[in-house]
Image: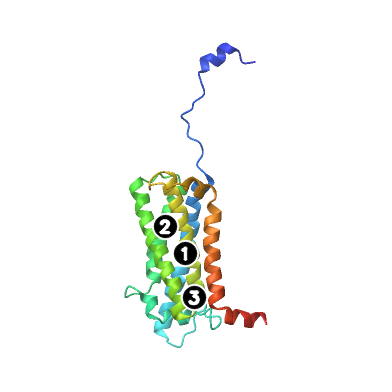
Amino acid sequence: MISPATTAAAGPPDTDVPSAPPFAVRVTRWILAAGGGIGLLAALTLTIEKINLLVDPGYRPSCSINPILSCGSVMTTPQAAAFGFPNPLIGVVGFSVVTTVGVLLLAGVRLPRWWWLGLQAGATFGVVFVHWLIYQSLYRIGALCPYCMIVWVVTIAIFWYVSLYNLHHRHLPAPPGATVLVRLHTVGVTGWYIVILVLIGEQFWFYWRTLLA
């Protein structure tokens, strides 16, 4: 039995020990490592397919499945080289950095605030660029690249969880309701994906309904 004297000697409980961060913050390292790795693989595959297409204009990319799901239709457009070189090269560089950061975090490395702000800037550029590509694919090109869509998915997830991490740690000014976003993190990103799926379904419904007939 612990006597009152022993309790008094032990002193009051340590109230300075920080509570465990929310799951949305703890999972960020896994999102970066896994999402970055998946995105890197997709970007490398797109780069190889682009090289094959340049070597042989008659080459049929492995992700050209039907008139809508057709990487070849997307790769040959000006939008596929928005900055004067193939877009997948941006992904190769960007996802390499993201994967490295995720692995460092999994290894227990603590990164400074300026690094997180730099990662936020990169993730923001990536998610804006991805949505420009989504618009171009849906309403200008009229075709979808499956490997590109994998990049869309992981880029959105990386941006979302990096933003939640920075909001939680006050690396960014936290708007009202930021804690709700962190707590209900899956709701926001799931809703984001659903909106994109609805847009894809609506834009290409003329084709999807032929598959259901």
Residue at the image position 52 percent from the left and 24 percent from the top: 13
- Compare residues 38 and 68 and report the one nearer the observer: 68
Q: CA distance from mark 3 to mark 2?
A: 22 Å
Q: Secondary structure at mark 3?
A: loop
Q: Secondary structure at mark 2?
A: helix
Q: Amino acid at mark 3?
A: Cys
Residue 110, relative to residue 212: is it above or below?
above
Q: Amino acid at mark 1?
A: Gly
**Outermost residue, left direction?**
84
- Asked if disc 1 and disc 2 are in contact, CB closer than 8 Å, the reply is yes
Mark 1 is surrounded, within 10 Å at the Cα level, by few (under 14), some (14 to 19) or many (20 or more) other residues, namely many
Considering the image in quadrants, where does the N terminus appear?
A: top right
**Outermost residue, bottom direction?**
58
- Asked if disc 3 and disc 1 are in contact, CB closer than 8 Å, the reply is no
- Compare residues 10 and 155 and report the one nearer the observer: 155
Residue at the image position 39 percent from the left and 76 percent from the top: 80
Going from the N terminus, do you reach mark 3 or mark 2 first?
Answer: 2
Q: Nearer the viewer, mark 3 or mark 1?
A: 3
Q: Secondary structure at mark 1?
A: helix
Residue denoted by label 2 = 98
Mark 3 is surrounded, within 10 Å at the Cα level, by few (under 14), some (14 to 19) or many (20 or more) other residues, namely many
Residue denoted by label 3 = 145
